[in-house]
Image: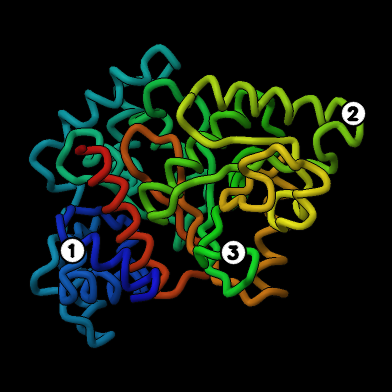
Amino acid sequence: MDFIDEIRSRAREKVKKIVLPESSDSRILSAAAKLFQEGIAEVVLIGNEEQIKFQAKNDGINLDNVEIIDPQSFAEIEGFAQTLFQLRKEKGITEEEARNLIENPLYFSTMLVYKGYAAGAVAGANNSTGDVLRPALQIIKTAPGISTVSGAFIMLLDSEYVPDGRLIMADCAVNPEPDSDQLAQIGVASSNTAKNIADIKPRTSFLSFSTKGSAEHPLVEKVKEAVKKAQKMDPNGSYDGELQADSALVSRVAEKKAPESTVAGRANVLIFPDLQAGNIGYKLVERLAGGVAVGPILQGMGKPINDLSRGCSVEDIINLVAITSLQAIKNDS
């Protein structure tokens, strides 16, 4: 069973309800139908039921068993608006602004998750990452002990340097210039993604242009501090750095540059020092090494909210819904 089949199969074991707010997109409608047909998740679409079903019929999509909620006729909409007002009034929002905002499908779907009506939400096919994250951070907020949301990719690779066939890369989506505290949180969150989603035992390397003091620079010191903080946050985890990429992945290089490390030469979680490096790195692996990038998976949220690429396929949507379900299942445990 390959990884994609595996995550879908694991999601079927405890089916979760996931909200897809971008119901004007035919890709979303097609994914919703397939998710129900394959028993991967219960899906909630947000919008006008008549319009959604008219579009689905024109596209040849059967939504007979898919739940549709229209915020404008939702019985608890006033309660949702009041909850949003209470959550944001110290930031200056008025009751009228909260009432108008809650009808936005992204805010409405996030409130469904916050209230426990659904286990998670997936959006981004027609919205930017910032648009997806804004209601999530305002309503659901981050998990206890975490203040940094980050984006990880699971890279599926056929390589001698990736014996599990799965490599976690982060942060590749959210934080442009993380400080050492943020970098540590990204490392711990990515380690959890490795365990809970990729189903591998994490060995987490914090990457740099230096290995174990081979260079001196404030950027290197930031990475060193992040490793110490990650180890303090997660004493039972396996973290090391600073390591160059070849020291992290290639055993013969690690034997020379970091012989005492239990991570070097065996790393399967790579933490990049900033977003530029992370985003460039995963795309190079995807394009030059033929890797399959699964994600981004948003890490650090109190409840799972995930962000699609605007160029996503129907299969990408299904996969991210399955991953969101797995995050929800883990939250239950």
Disc 1 versus disc 3: distance between alpha carbons?
28 Å
In the picture shown, does residue 317 fall above or below 205?
A: below
Q: Amino acid at mark 1?
A: Arg
Q: Amino acid at mark 3?
A: Val
Per the image, label 3 sits on a secondary structure element best described as: loop
Say which of 122 and 333 sits in front: 333
Q: Residue at x 50, y 22 (%)?
A: 233
Badge number at residue 113 = none
Residue denoted by label 3: 162
Residue denoted by label 1: 12
In the picture shown, does residue 50 fall above or below 216?
A: below
Q: Of label 2 and label 1, which has the lower sequence position?
A: 1
Work out which quarter of the rendered image holds the C terminus and state it: top left
Q: Tell me if I can see residue 310 in this picture.
A: no
Residue 30: give x, y in percent of width and height. Answer: 29, 76
Q: Are marks 3 and 2 in contact (CB under 8 Å)?
A: no
Residue 141: give x, y in percent of width and height. Answer: 39, 28
Per the image, label 2 sits on a secondary structure element best described as: loop
Q: Of label 3 and label 2, which has the lower sequence position?
A: 3
Residue 228 sits in which quadrant? top right
Neighbour tally class for label 1: few under 14, some 14-19, many 20 plus, Cα within 10 Å: some
Q: Amino acid at mark 2?
A: His
In the picture shown, does residue 209 fall above or below 8?
A: above
Q: Residue at x 82, y 31 (%)?
A: 220
Residue denoted by label 2: 217
Foreground disc of the pair 1, 3: 3
Q: Of label 1 and label 3, which has the lower sequence position?
A: 1
Q: Are marks 2 and 1 in contact (CB under 8 Å)?
A: no
Work out which quarter of the rendered image holds the N terminus and state it: bottom left
